[in-house]
Image (tube, rainbow, N blue to C red):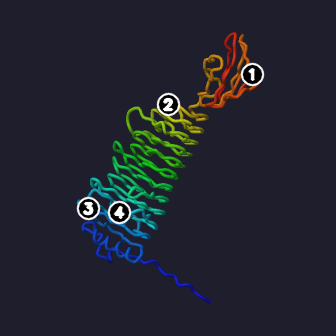
């Protein structure tokens, strides 16, 4: 019978390289020495025992297969008073490389509210993992996924069970040329100064699940991005807006919770303000009863085509400012039953169903001679009776000798 020897991972304990972790000594050189030693050996785990490790410069990782691991949030890396305007931890590359096999886990990264300081910057990484990390008091970015240092993109980063908080007017998670990321079970909170963002995504194909956004000026800013999904997230205590679509396409918000308003003035939960916005979907989201937001939605007149779709959401009595797309079957908002019918347009002029619900339209000649009725430009072969007109679809009457009448009933 043969046995396979189990080789334990090699740990580079920062205290063995001179780090004190006492909250007063500058441990930058000792920690960087541990990192460099691990890199020289081809990679490894740099371990931070419980303690507070003061740094005065960026801790730099420039090799694949590197891990920074603490003993939980009792292992703290803290920016010292002389820390420059830079990331506390940065994974770097040269030329068009990608950095792979990076993990940062089980630690507290404290920017100490030092001006210009960011938490973690990952440059051109693939398959990186940030797991159970608390990033706090970083005034610029909590996490920056940066694909910009070379011509290559970054991709496939996972951020899990982490808290990114207390950034004021900063950004919790910022992406640039870094896509196909998965963000799960994270908290983004207290980006509550004017211009603060829980998350700003600038590239697409991101999956955000089970996250909480609390007390942010804007919870999520989608900046000319596409193919994102937000599922089962909680948005609470927003100050200006929960969601800001600025050139977003093909993004879905499904089964999220929208909570209360903590700001002042006339504000909307969802703001859509660019002609590049199109084909986004809001489905089955729930709005908290008694919220003091002014509007559920505010789209400007430049909203692109095809428009966005809003269905099966619970909205209550909040106002909706909408310019395009489909808005139907939303509890507490969409009309049902008898509708105030639009004026019958001139012969051959299409009338679009803009009520936001599918409708049954009963057409009667009433002294006119109707020769054709079309739905969506396709002839029905009938000249009177009941017709199904889906939300956003058109009905066209061709007639003479008077004006027909019609009655509309919504679902």
Question: How far apart are labels 2 and 4 at the CA level?
Answer: 43 Å
Task: Please report contact status of discs 3 and 1: CB closer than 8 Å, yes or no.
Answer: no
Res. 385 mark: 1
Dot 3 corresponds to which residue? 80
In the rendered image of this protein, does residue 354 appear above or below residue 49? Answer: above
Residue 321 is marked as 2
> At which x and y percent is residue 282?
55, 41
Distance from disc 4 to disc 1, alpha carbons, whole Å, reads: 70 Å
Calculate the distance from the C-alpha at mark 4 to the C-alpha at mark 3.
14 Å
Q: Quadrant of the C terminus?
A: top right
Looking at the image, which residue is at 27% across and 53% down? 115
Q: Residues within 10 Å of mark 4 (few under 14, many from 20)?
A: many
Q: CA distance from mark 3 to mark 2?
A: 48 Å
Q: CA distance from mark 3 to mark 1?
A: 78 Å
Which residue is pictured at 68% across the width and 16% down the height? 405
As drawn, is 362 to the left or to the right of 60?
right
State whether residue 104 appears in this view: yes
Element on which disc 3 rests: loop
Query: Judging from the image, what secondary structure is the residue with disc 2 in?
Result: strand
Which SS class for mark 1? strand
Residue 50 numbered tag = none
Contact (CB < 8 A) between labels 3 and 2?
no
Quadrant assignment, res 252: top right
The residue indicated by pointer 4 is 89
Relative height, residue 162 to residue 369 (above, below)? below
């Amino acid at each position: 019978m043969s046995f396979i020897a189990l080789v334990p991972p090699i740990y580079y304990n920062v205290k063995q390289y001179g780090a004190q972790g006492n909250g007063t000594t500058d441990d930058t050189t000792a920690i960087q020495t541990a990192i460099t030693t691990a890199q020289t050996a081809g990679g490894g785990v740099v371990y931070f025992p419980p303690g507070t490790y003061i740094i005065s410069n960026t801790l730099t990782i420039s090799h694949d297969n590197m891990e920074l691991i603490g003993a939980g949030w009792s292992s703290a890396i803290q920016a010292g008073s002389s820390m420059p305007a830079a990331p506390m931890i940065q994974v770097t590359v040269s030329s068009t490389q990608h950095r792979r096999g990076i993990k940062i886990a089980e630690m507290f990264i404290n920017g100490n509210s030092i001006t210009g300081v960011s938490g973690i910057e990952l440059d051109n990484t693939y398959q990186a993992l940030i797991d159970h990390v608390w990033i706090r008091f970083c005034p610029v970015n909590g996490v920056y996924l940066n694909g910009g240092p070379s011509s290559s993109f970054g991709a496939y980063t996972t951020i899990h069970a982490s808290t990114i908080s207390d950034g004021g007017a900063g950004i919790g998670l910022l992406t640039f040329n870094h896509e196909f990321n998965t963000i799960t079970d994270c908290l983004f909170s207290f980006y509550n100064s004017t211009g603060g963002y829980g998350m700003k995504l600038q590239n697409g194909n991101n999956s955000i699940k089970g996250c909480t956004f609390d007390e942010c000026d804007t919870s999520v800013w989608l900046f000319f991005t596409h193919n994102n999904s937000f599922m089962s997230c909680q948005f609470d205590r927003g100050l200006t807006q929960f969601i800001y679509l600025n050139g977003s396409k093909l993004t879905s918000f499904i089964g999220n919770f929208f909570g209360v308003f903590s700001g002042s003035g006339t504000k909307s939960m969802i703001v859509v303000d660019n002609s590049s916005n199109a084909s986004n979907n809001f489905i089955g989201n729930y709005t908290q009863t008694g919220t003091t937001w002014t509007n559920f939605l505010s789209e400007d007149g430049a909203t692109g085509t095809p428009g966005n779709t809003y269905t099966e959401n619970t909205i209550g009595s909040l106002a909706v400012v909408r310019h395009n797309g489909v808005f139907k079957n939303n509890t507490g908002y969409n009309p049902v039953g008898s509708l105030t019918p639009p004026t019958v347009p001139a012969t051959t002029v299409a009338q679009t169903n803009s009520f936001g619900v599918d409708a049954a339209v009963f057409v009667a000649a009433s002294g006119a001679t109707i020769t054709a009725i079309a739905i969506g430009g396709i002839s029905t072969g009938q000249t009177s009776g009941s017709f199904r007109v889906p939300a956003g679809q058109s009905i066209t009457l061709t007639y003479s000798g008077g004006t027909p009448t019609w009655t509309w009933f919504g679902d």
